Amino acid sequence: MDHDQRFEAAMHHALAEATGPGCPPRLAAAMEYAVFPGGARVRPRLCLAVAAACGNDQPALSTAAAVSIELLHCASLVHDDLPCFDDAPMRRGKPSVHVAFGEDLAVLAGDALIVLAFQTLAREAAHVPERLAALTLTVANAVGGPHGVVAGQAWESEAEIALMDYERAKTGSLFAAATVAGAQAAGAAPLTWLDVGARIGAAFQVADDIHDLIGDADKMGKPIGQDAVHHRPSVAREFGVPAAKKQLEHLVVGAIRSIPPCPGAKQLRQLILREAQNFIPRGIGGIRAA
Amino acid sequence: MDHDQRFEAAMHHALAEATGPGCPPRLAAAMEYAVFPGGARVRPRLCLAVAAACGNDQPALSTAAAVSIELLHCASLVHDDLPCFDDAPMRRGKPSVHVAFGEDLAVLAGDALIVLAFQTLAREAAHVPERLAALTLTVANAVGGPHGVVAGQAWESEAEIALMDYERAKTGSLFAAATVAGAQAAGAAPLTWLDVGARIGAAFQVADDIHDLIGDADKMGKPIGQDAVHHRPSVAREFGVPAAKKQLEHLVVGAIRSIPPCPGAKQLRQLILREAQNFIPRGIGGIRAA
């Protein structure tokens, strides 16, 4: 099994625990639908890559960290797609959870996935209890208030958006958590990793803005043009695609330069470049990060 | 400060961490609105009483456990009141969160409170890391799938309700977690406490059924007659108030008899009786638990 297959197996294992005997069947189905088949799984791959770069002495724990981050990401997509937010009909090329199962089950599936994220961490930390509190706080801070994903989404309900707070919270926080949690799971000093994740998160957000402006809805598996519809700030729309692409390159270079000294720094640099190439739409040229 | 005041102070402290500088103001307001002023705070009081009965050698941790359980309870009320579930206009004598702040902020406030529950546990477990994993799992299992509060709510979206699974999940699970977590926070063997909490939870559910049938909406702070409207199973409606009251007494007696040997067993017995007297509507007589 390669890394990706092992990660998917861990996702299936986590879901099986939460949807086992006694679970209402439609809740179980909605949770599975929200998580499989997955999207790009960018955040957990980043988390596992940082853990590997740091020696990964507790593979079960780093996998649990990656799973918890991806579960929280999936939960945020389910809730963000609800009619009271984006009212998105499609996600990952199929009807979104509330369209397929109803709003009630979409709310509950999201809730249950949030809980499962913390359950998964606690379950796998049995052999290394001294790492659990810090990992839980990293993941929780990335999704809760005042600076996490939930806060990012809540900025869209304010009359005035605090732009930096919004972007950092909406996308940056979970990427930053992915790198920090990868280091923490491997017993490495976490804070030096914060910057790497924050920059990759910002780059991903710029790439997403470009996709939303000029991407292909079929390939994305979700509608495009949504930033304009929902009056969301977008670098690509405000400054144009070439400027946005330049900013993306700048952020990726910054992320790579921020990698602290660690056994697997070289492989990690290559992986980040490869992932970044996949971020951006084909047709506007590759990333120059020399 | 007495116990209740100390608990409320800990709730305020937890909320302050999650709604601090950088938090979108309406999200912060919705979260506070959902939590203060509180309801009866039955679950956290039970949790703290069990911790006290077990010696309570880590008061900060038992308080965190009680806070996390109450935050999860508040989150479940916010989401259950949404239009896609009970569509409840009032809660605790004021407009429910989605009426006061909109559905979007009700969804997000609930999400953020779920996250805050796990954040609070992790933050206070710094000095006793070896107790965190078990506590987190107790609390998470009580709210997630397959048997937690979320699963209980999800049974209402099924064509056929598995009655025992439903009642155990919807109310019993968080009461059971309150006693188990109280014991775990104090370093006591947790499993012997499961039965005490499960029985109290079942008693509370019966009391709630009686209230919903013959209670006073003004005193309850929420509409009555909702079990019939939403076709929810109700012991009181099916077998009548006297039979329901008898079952309640039976459950309370069973809970008291299940208390395992511990330093504070006598005080705990008295507290459970006192709380149980408060459950039931005045006018149908006190509980006979002799």
Image (spheres, coloured by chain):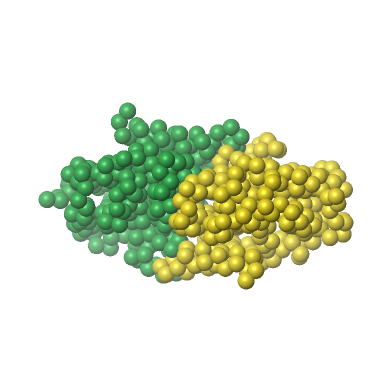
Chain colours: A yellow, B green
Total numbered circles: 0
Which one is nearer the viewer's eye here, A191 or A33?
A191
Q: Is residue B168 visible?
A: yes
Q: Tell me if residue B159 comes above or below residue A58 in the rendering.
A: below
Q: Quadrant of residue B63?
A: top left
Q: Is residue B108 visible?
A: no
The N terminus of chain A sits in image quarter:
bottom right
The residue positioned 87% from the left and 48% from the top of the image is A242
The residue positioned 85% from the left and 50% from the top of the image is A290
Q: In which quarter of the image is residue B171?
A: bottom left
Q: Find residue A134 and report its horizontal and vertical position in percent.
A: 52, 45
The residue positioned 63% from the left and 52% from the top of the image is A54
> Which residue sits furthest top?
B1
Q: Find residue B22 and report its horizontal and vertical position in percent.
A: 61, 34
Question: Is A241 displayed left or right of A74 in the figure?
Answer: right
> Which residue sits furthest bottom?
A1
Q: Find residue A228 and report its horizontal and vertical position in percent.
A: 76, 48
The residue positioned 70% from the left and 37% from the top of the image is A164
> Which residue sits furthest left?
B290
Which one is nearer the viewer's eye here, A64 or B239?
A64
Q: Tell me if residue A145 comes above or below residue B137 in the rendering.
A: above
Which one is nearer the viewer's eye here, A60 or A278?
A60
Question: Is B278 displayed left or right of A281 in the figure?
Answer: left
> Which residue sits furthest front?
A263
Q: In which quarter of the image is residue B46?
A: top left
